Amino acid sequence: MGFRCIQCGFPVRTLYVQYSPGNIRLMKCESCKAVADEYIECEIMVPILPYPTGPRLTDIFSTMSSINKQSSFRSLILEGSKGKLGSSKGFSSLVSICWKVVMDVFFGNLMCNDLLLMLMISSYFKIFLVAMMVWEFPSSVIVIIELFCLSSNAVALKEIMNNNAAQRPLNGDADDDDEDDGGGLEAWERTYAEDRSWEALQEDESGLLRPIDNTAIYHAQYRRRLRNLASKAATARIQKGLIRYLYVVVDLSKAASERDFRPSRMAVIGKQVEAFIREFFDQNPLSHVGLVTIKDGIAYCLTELGGSPESHIKALMGKLECSGDASLQNALELVLGYLNQIPSYGHREVLVLYSALSTCDPGDLMETIQKCKKSKIRCSVIGLAAEMFVCKHLCQETGGTYSVALDETHFRELILEHAPPPPAIAEYASANLIKMGFPQRSAEGSVAICTCHEEAKTGGGYTCPRCKVRVCELPTECRICGLTLISSPHLARSYHHLFPIVMFDEVSPSSQNDASLGFSNTCFGCQQSLNSQGNKPGLSVICPKCKQQFCLDCDIYIHESLHNCPGCESSRHLKSLTASQ
Amino acid sequence: MTSAPSKLYADDVSLLVVTLDTNPFFWTTFSFPFADFLSQVLAFLNSILLLGQLNQVMVIATGCNSCRFVYDSTSDKNHGSTIGTMPALYSNLLHNLDQFVARDRQLASPHAPGTVPSSLLSGSLSMALCYIQRAFRSGPMPPQPRILCLQGAADGPEQYVAIMNAIFSAQHSSVPIDSCYIGSNNSAFLQQASYITDGIYYKPPQLDGLYQYLSTVFATDLHSRAFLRLPKSMGVDFRASCFCHKQTIDMGYVCSVCLSIFCEHHDKCSTCGSVFGQAQLDASAADRKRKA
Ligand SMILES: [Zn+2]
Ligand SMILES: [Zn+2]
Ligand SMILES: [Zn+2]
Ligand SMILES: [Zn+2]
Ligand SMILES: [Zn+2]
Ligand SMILES: [Zn+2]
Ligand SMILES: [Zn+2]
C-alpha cells in the first residue's frame, strides 16, 4: 500500500530519505506542507501506537471500511517489521502479540491509556537512538537496540494482557457503559449476532452444509399448540372477554435504561408496545387502551382510554426517556381511579411492563393490591429483569399472569400473548346486550355536515341509522340520539373466536397411497400435489367434516389466518348442517 | 399469527384469481344469457395473459352447491396447440366448467321454490386465498396476486362470518379483492371486501359492453392502478346480518361477551350462553325513552 500524509491524507511517495544509517530526513507533504509522518522515527511502533488514540491517523483510515482497516493494518505491521527486522527470531511471536493487542483495542477490551503508558515505558532503549545520531555506530547496533526494545515491548504487552484478563470480570460492566450501543461489536458483526444464521445449518451425510428442514418440526409444534387451545376451549366454552379496558403501564425508571436488551430496555419496550397495540386493536375491535408511565416514583397518565392505536403510539414514542425510581403502588392507584369509572360489561385489565427490581411506594402496596382485587381488575406483569415476589403476588391475587422476559424475542412473545381476548370470567364483567347501529358509508364525493366537527365535509362519512346524521369516524356514539355506532367489520374481526374450526386429522402416508379411500392426492386448498416425492413422506391432513385433504402449509394457514375450511365452505350440504347445530 | 408476506413482488407479473359465479338459479332468472357473459369473460382472461408472458390466471367456479378450480394457466394441458377451431384455453376451461356444472346439479339440495339460493362465495374466496398463499411460498419474488369476483347472485347472509374471515385474511396478507357485481342490487359483502382490502368494486351499468368494463377497470396491474382514474366507491353498505334470522339489519343488539348480533332483544345469548343481567334492560329502556 502507498503512504499517505497523516495530516490531510494526501498520497506521498516516501516518508523519509535515509542519508546514513540512523540519519534520516522526514519528507513534507506536497498538499499541506507539513511533515508527512512525524511518527516515522518511532519506527515499528508507528502503526500500533497512534491508531487507537491518535485522531489524525484515524481520520485517514476512516474513509475505508472496517474490514479494509484490519487488513491494511496487518500489512502495515508486516511491511514495517520485514524491513527493519529481517529474519529476527522473535518476529512471528511478536507479530501475533501485536495483532492480538490491536484486536483487543478494536473490541474495547484494553484501555487505551494503559497501552500507551506501557509502550512508552517499555521503549526506553530507544534513548540510544538519539545517541546514535551524534556518534557514528556500525549499523548492526541499530538491530541490537531494536531487539532489546522489542523484547521489552513484548514482555510489557504480555503482562498488560494478563492483567486485563484478570480484571475483566470485575469491571466488565463499567467498560460496557463506556462503549457506544454497538456493545463492542462492529456493525457487520451485529447483524450476524442477531440472526444466528449459522444455527439454521446442518451437515448432511456427504458433509455438505444444508439449511435445516424444519417444516416438519414447525408443523408438529403448531399442532401441539392447536391441541392445547382446543382442550382449553372445550373446558371453558367460548366465553371471551371481548370488550376490554386495558391500561398498559410502562416503567420508565432508571432501570429502563439498562442495556441488557439491545439497544436498551426502553427502546425494546417502545418497539414491542407499538406492535402490541396494533395487534390488540386488530383482535379486540371494541376495546380501549390507555397508557401510563412511571418516572421519578410518580405515575403519569400518558393517554386516556381510547380506541385509536395511532394516538397511543405517537404519545409513547414522544415520551421515551427515563429517570428516577419506579413505584408500583402509584401506578396501580392511578389506574384504579380510571378503571372504576368504566361500564360494568367491560373487562378491566392492567398490563405492567416492569424493568426495575424495586418499588418505591408512599404507602402499603398490599392494600392497593387488595383494592385491585375488589375492583376486579386483572393485573398482569411482564418483568424485564428478574422475578419479584410483589409482582407475583399481585398477579396471583388478581388473576393475571406473571412472566419474566429472557430476551427481546421472548419479550415479544410474552407481550403478544396478552393480545387475544382472555377467557371471560363471569364474575368479572356482567353480560349485557348493547344496542348498536351499523351505519352505511356514503359515496365518495358527497357533501354533508357532520355532527362531530360541525362543518361541511366532502367524502365518505357514515350515517346514523336511527337519526340519519353524519359522523366522520367509527366507532363512536351518535351525538344526537346516543346510539353506539360501529361498523360491522369491526365486530366481525373477532368472530373467528366464536366459531373456531375443528382440528384436522393427520393422514399417514401409507393410508394416503391406498386407492380404496379415494383421495384425490392434491391439496383441496392450493391444488398442490400431495404425492410422496423422493424419500420424503408426503404428509397431509384431512378435515373431519368435509373429508377434504389439505397440505401442511394450508393447514397452518387455515387455522392461523383464514379461520375457514375451504372444503366445508364450498359445500352447501355441510354448511346447512353446521348452521343447524 | 403468520406474518404478512414480504412486499417484494416480481415486477409486472400478476397472479389473477377469478371466481366465476355459475349459480344456475341466478342465470336462468337473469336477463343476460350466461353464454354471452362467459364469452366476454374468456376474452378478458385472454387479454390478461397477453398483457404479460408471465401473468398467471386461475379460475374458480362458484357454484350453488360446490366450488372448484376450473382453469389454471400454468398447467401443462393448456399449452397444447389449438384443438380444432378452439384455442386450448377455451376448450380446457369450457370442458372443466361443463363437468363442474353437471356435478353441481347432482349435489343440489331442495330449496324453497321462488327464491334464488346464494352462490358459495365464501368457499371460492377461501380456495383462492389458499392458492395465493402457495404462490407466496413459491419463491422470493412471487407474482403479485389479486382476486377478482365476478358475482351475480345475491349475498347469502349465512356466509357472513366465513366471508368476513376471508376478507380479513386477505387484508392481512395484502391481497386486494376486486369485485364486478352484475346482479340487480349492490352486494354488501363484496362492497365491504373491496373496501377493506383496497380493491375496486364496480357494478357495470350495461352488460353488453362487459368486456370493455372488465378490460379498462380490472385488467391493469396493481402498480399501474395508481395512475388511473378508476370508478369511485359509491358508498359501502356496512350493515351486518343478525345471528338469529340471518337478516341484514342496520340496528341491533350486540352481546357484550361474544359480540354476536341479534335483531331483537333476547334474555340469553344463543352463541355463548351468557344470561343478560338487569342493567341492560334499564339501559335499553332509557334508550327507548330518549328515542321517544
Ligand atoms: Zn498533507
Ligand atoms: Zn366530523
Ligand atoms: Zn343518531
Ligand atoms: Zn395446500
Ligand atoms: Zn372442512
Ligand atoms: Zn334476527
Ligand atoms: Zn354472547
Image (cartoon, coloured by chain):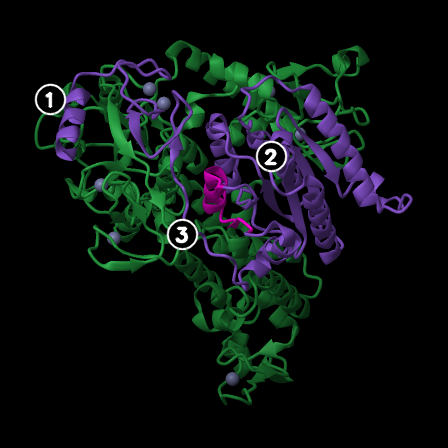
> Residue A242: percent from the left, percent from the top?
32, 27
Identify which amino acid the numbered label 1 is placed on. Answer: Glu
Is B133 magenta? The answer is: no
Q: Chain of mark 3?
A: A
- Depth check: give the residue in front, A554 or A575: A575
Is residue B210 at all visible to an observer of this figure?
yes
Q: Chain of mark 1?
A: A
Q: Judge depth for marks 1 and 2 and give the one in front.
A: 2
Q: Are marks 1 and 2 on the same chain?
A: no
The chain painted green is A
* Residue beneath disc 2: B29
> Considering the numbered disc 2 on the image, is that residue within a helix, a strand or a loop?
helix
Q: Which portion, as a residue range, is magenta?
A: B185-204
* Residue beneath disc 1: A367
Q: Earlier in the sequence, mark 3 or mark 1?
A: 3
* Residue beneath disc 3: A181
Identify the residue shown where x is 71% and y is 31%.
A527
Spatial separation of the CA atoms under disc 3 and disc 1: 41 Å
Callouts 3 and 2 close, C-beta under 8 Å: no
Is residue A214 at all visible to an observer of this figure?
no
